[in-house]
Amino acid sequence: MTTVYDGHCHVASTHFIPSAFVEDVAGNVHTRLAARGGPSPTVARIARGYADQHQDHLADGLVAEMDAAGIDRAVLLVPDFSLRMPGCAPPAAAARLHQEIRQRHPQRFWVYIGVDPRRGPDGVRAFAQMVGEYALDGVKLYPPCGYSPSDPGLYPYYEICAALSLPVFVHTGPTAASLDYEPAHPLNVDRAARDFPGVDFVLGHAGLTHVEVGSYLAAYRPNVYLDIGGFGSTPTLPNWPEHLNRLFRAGINHKIIFGTDWPLGRMGGGLKRLTDEVLHGPTVFAGISRTDRRLILCENLLRVLAPDSRPAPHPTAPP
Ligand SMILES: [Zn+2]
């Protein structure tokens, strides 16, 4: 049995995703459908459909999908949108709600909490307190909210991450239409990655967009990793099994972390359809060694997590 960890999930809850973000996504879906001349629901109706899919506030639905798909544990990413898009839980409330989810589903989730450099010293203090109180496992950055991952305002957070061996997950590439794309270019992480060699930076989605830049950063910067979250649901990647297989032949499998970006793609068959194709389909791991497969599916993620966050070895596992 292959151990599978999902390095990129979200709780599908309207508590954590702003309605403005959902409306932006719905706008693009509407444009895509309308261009093809077929029946196209209104933006408001598509947005309502997304909101209906985001009522899994305690992650029971996610855990059921993980069980069906054979995913042992997952990282829950909690972006901090609240300075740019109001209407969702700010970091302290989000951390508390995620702690409740973790207590409800023990041993299933790691949690990376969102921070924003514009919160100043108060934000750093609140972060340090949350990390201590809830034993959080990492940091999530959302640069399209309007800051670079190398913003000096983030350095106090990175000091804490270095001291506690916490990874930093950085969204890269496109997102909701009303946010900024320029700060989401993966090269923006380079300064911080050089200044904090003891902190691991995971480039969200960089296995799908800006792949060339993400790949050379992962190949040459010892502390930069590549995430493939969203591979099964992006409309620009209809041949994702071939794309992943090409990526897995690029010589950087010691740096690629498997992730789905659930609930993205929830309407298209969910986690089981995706993992069945990845694990048992003919293409994704064709010609890839078992060692590399293990690195991508679980061991690279364990390497970036603080030693205390790693699950205890299974009692029957060989030493
Ligand atoms: Zn995501």
Image (cartoon, grey):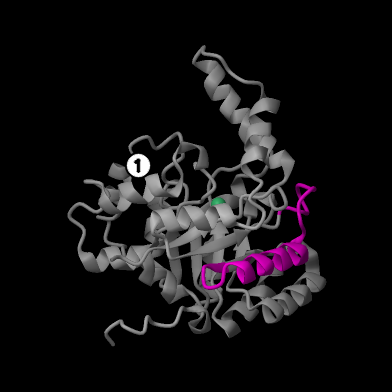
Q: Is mark 1 within 8 Å of ligand 1?
A: no
Residue sitting at the far left: 287
- Secondary structure at badge 1 equals helix
Is 22 on the left-hand or right-hand side of 318? right
Specify start and end residues of the magenta stretch as a single range. Answer: 81-110
Q: Position of residue 276 (x, y in %)?
A: 33, 49
Q: Quadrant of the C terminus?
A: bottom left
Residue at the disc numbered 1: 240
Q: Position of residue 56 (x, y in %)?
A: 63, 50
Which one is in front, 45 or 37? 45
Which one is in front, 63 or 299? 63
Q: Quadrant of residue 42?
A: top right
Q: Position of residue 163 (x, y in %)?
A: 59, 85
Residue 112 appears anywhere in the view: yes
Q: Quadrant of the N terminus?
A: bottom left
Q: Residue at x 45, y 34 (%)?
A: 235
Q: Would residue 301 be counted in the magenta stretch?
A: no
Q: Residue at x 41, y 52 (%)?
A: 207
Is 7 on the left-hand or right-hand side of 104? left
* Relative vertical location of residue 34 with respect to residue 239 in this rendering, above or below: above
* Relative vertical location of residue 181 with respect to residue 91 in this rendering, above or below: above
Q: Would residue 84 be counted in the magenta stretch?
A: yes
Residue sitting at the far bottom: 319
Q: Residues within 10 Å of mark 1 (few under 14, many from 20)?
A: many
Residue 149 appears anywhere in the view: no
Is 274 on the left-hand or right-hand side of 74? left
Q: Residue at x 59, y 60 (%)?
A: 77
Residue type at mark 1 is Trp
Q: Position of residue 3 (x, y in %)?
A: 35, 67
Q: Residue at x 66, y 35 (%)?
A: 24
* Relative vertical location of residue 11 with respect to residue 267 in this rendering, above or below: below
